[in-house]
Image (cartoon, rainbow, N blue to C red):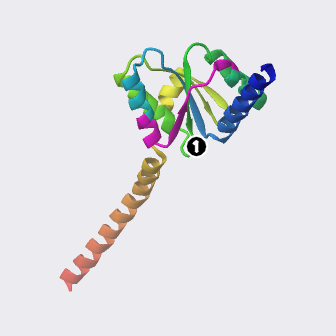
């Protein structure tokens, strides 16, 4: 019985390690006080955003984090902690959780792991303010397009002036 329990724990630690290694960003939040409806709503919102939301025993997360060399997260693993794994966009989990926390004060963002770096709650909130990657790319392309549009307008005006003079 004891070895079976140990095997189950080893499997869970391996699962957590895999998710931590694969994720672009992981946000730790304290969810204590959310009722079932709120938790269901949060999970649905995260799932729609492509974020995996899990609750593991802190001791198993600590073992996995230590094996991966990200021990700086250990002090943040106290109490009822959930993990939100963002695999595509490192900021999406922080954005969704932060947005949810604005209307549900019992949800508290504790820390995050972004590509091996540990962020505290203030840094996570700042991270949540960063627009999605698609929006940033659109803004960048828009800033390239504006001067070109102005140049085209100027050249067209010069051409029209020359045509009216002739």
* Residue appearing at x 58%, y 43% in the figure: 87
The region drawn magenta spans: 44-59
Question: In the picture provided, is 149 more to the left or to the right than 79?
Answer: left
Q: State whether residue 144 is above or below residue 78.
A: below
Image quarter for residue 159? bottom left
Residue situated in front as seen by the camera: 141 or 156: 141
* Residue appearing at x 48%, y 26% in the figure: 125
Outermost bottom residue? 166
Residue 16: x %, y % from top left: 67, 32
Image quarter for residue 80? top right
Quadrant (top left, top right, bottom left, bottom right) of the N terminus: top right
Mark 1 = which residue?
87
Whether residue 54 is visible, yes or no, is yes
* Residue appearing at x 43%, y 28% in the figure: 98
Question: In the picture provided, is 64 more to the left or to the right than 76?
Answer: right
Residue situated in front as seen by the camera: 164 or 135: 135
Quadrant (top left, top right, bottom left, bottom right) of the C terminus: bottom left
């Amino acid at each position: 019985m004891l070895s079976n329990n140990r095997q189950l724990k080893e499997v869970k630690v391996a699962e957590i390690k895999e998710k931590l290694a694969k994720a672009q960003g992981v946000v730790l939040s304290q969810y204590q006080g959310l009722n079932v409806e709120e938790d269901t709503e949060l999970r649905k919102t995260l799932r729609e955003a492509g974020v995996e939301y899990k609750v593991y025993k802190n001791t198993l997360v600590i073992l996995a984090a230590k094996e991966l060399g990200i021990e700086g997260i250990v002090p943040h693993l106290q109490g009822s902690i959930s993990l939100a794994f963002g695999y595509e966009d490192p900021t999406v989990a922080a954005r969704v959780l932060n947005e949810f926390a604005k209307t549900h004060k019992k949800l508290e963002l504790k820390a995050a792991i972004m590509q091996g770096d540990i962020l505290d709650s203030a840094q996570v909130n700042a991270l949540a303010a960063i627009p999605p990657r698609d929006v940033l790319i659109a803004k960048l392309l828009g800033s390239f397009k504006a001067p070109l549009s102005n140049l085209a307008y100027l050249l067209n005006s010069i051409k029209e002036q020359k045509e009216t003079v002739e």
